[in-house]
Image: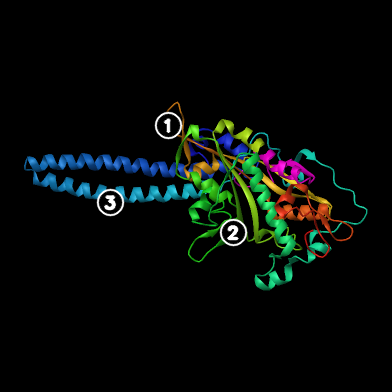
Amino acid sequence: MHDIRAIRENPAAFDIAMERRGIRSASKNVLEQDQARRKSILEAEIAQSEQNRAAKDAGAAKARGDESEFNRLRSLVADKKAKIAALQNAAADLDSKLSELLMKLPNLPHEDVPDGQDDNDNVKLHQWGEPRTFNFTPKEHFEIEGVRHGMDFEIAAKLSGSRFVVMSAGIARIHRALAQFMIDTHVERNGLVETWTPVLVRPDMMLGTGQLPKFGEDSYETTNGWWLVPTAEVTLTNLVNGLIVEEQSLPRRYVAHTQCFRSEAGSAGKDTAGMLRQHQFEKVEMVSVTLPEESLNEHERMTRCAESVLEMLDLPYRTMILSTGDMGFGARKTHDIEVWLPGQGKYREISSVSLCGDFQARRMNARYRSTGGGKPKYLHTLNGSGLAVGRCLIAVLENGQQEDGSVALPEAIRPYLGGKTRLASNGALD
């Protein structure tokens, strides 16, 4: 959420920043709503002062036996009381509408973010690894012979509908091994704190990280008002919801492996084959909570944490900085890491690492107390996939596929597979 005082003090700068995200004259409605709210508050305060004075004068009239003046002033006090209640209710309603308006406005882009309309305007920062040269036409993951034995979309459709998968035997074990490898890497090598969190949350938690109110259709709400998390960003970031933490406790770096749930409402017809885009999937999520002056460096650090997983798995990737037109709602700056998928012959996103600044912290009222004292200040939050487990599985299978339908597995995950080195064409690990 945005700081209304900053908008009030420099609406032109706010409008310029919002125009980079395709929203024109954003400050106009905000300031009109704010002005009406402040007017109601001021009128209520004036009426309260008048009521207090009338009540005092009524007491004096009563003391001197002026019954007529006392009755007049008592009537005035009653009138002022009703007016104050009406003005306070109006101010509360206007305050609610202002908050709702601010909640629906995206974060302001960082000055480093390139302007653009969509993903065609993203800029490549760097690339790692060379795509493998095949002496046969590489297949997509679900077409590889060894994979077909352990990846069943038909039975998943019978159980749950489209965009689900049932994994078994060697494929299920590789999938689990990748998640364990990622968690261990982030804990032991990258210094993140492993955390286990619920996948059902209250609506105010979704509000705090920006999934609500604008993007409710992208997630699943239960009949009792809980929401299934689209990512552990929701729970990990909200660990500081409503808190004032001590400066010396920062940065806080969390990592969690969770089930995630997305309706994919806006992706009808996209990536319908295979398990690239599912309603239920697993992800290893990283979240950092930092001091404002450290958040840019933390963004680079988190990006390297995600990249290092791909390097250890020997998977070629490229890192992009997203343009203003492709960046997520809550982000000030985002790095997308795209892994090479030879079956598709293209790079596909496997991680987004975003700097949110104080945008989420304001929504959550999450602050820190400086060691030097003074008024508590808003924290900065960051989040990023480290990585999407299913997409990593796809990349491992497609990049390691052999002409006979088997798959050579990365050395980094072999200890998690009991030393097995490949997925055979019959679906077994050997």
**What is the three-letter code of the residue carrying label 1?**
Lys
As rendered, which of 132 and 377 lies closer to the eye?
A: 132
Q: CA distance from mark 3 to mark 1?
A: 36 Å
As rendered, which of 226 and 429 lies closer to the eye?
A: 429
Q: Which mark is residue 219?
A: 2
* Of pointers 3 and 2, the one earlier in the residue sequence: 3
For disc 3, the neighbor class at 10 Å (few under 14, some 14 to 19, many from 20) is few
Q: Are marks 3 and 2 in contact (CB under 8 Å)?
A: no
Circle 3: element type: helix
Q: Position of residue 413 (x, y in %)?
A: 73, 50
Position of 85 with respect to 228 (left or right) is left
As rendered, which of 13 and 123 lies closer to the eye?
A: 123
The residue shown at (50%, 38%) is 3
Position of 56 with respect to 230 (left or right) is left
Up-down: is 79 above or below 374?
below
Residue 316 part of the magenta segment: yes
Q: Position of residue 149 (x, y in %)?
A: 78, 67
Q: Which residue is mark 1?
A: 375
Q: Position of residue 19 (x, y in %)?
A: 64, 41
| Residue 38 visible to an observer of this rendering | yes
**What is the three-letter code of the residue carrying label 3?**
Ala
Circle 1: element type: loop
The residue shown at (49%, 56%) is 202
**What is the three-letter code of the residue carrying label 2?**
Ser
Circle 2: element type: loop
Q: How many marks?
A: 3
Up-down: is 424 above or below 350?
below
Up-down: is 358 above or below 280?
above
| Highlighted range, magenta | 302-331
For disc 2, the neighbor class at 10 Å (few under 14, some 14 to 19, many from 20) is many
Q: Which residue is mark 3?
A: 82
Q: CA distance from mark 2 to mark 1?
A: 37 Å
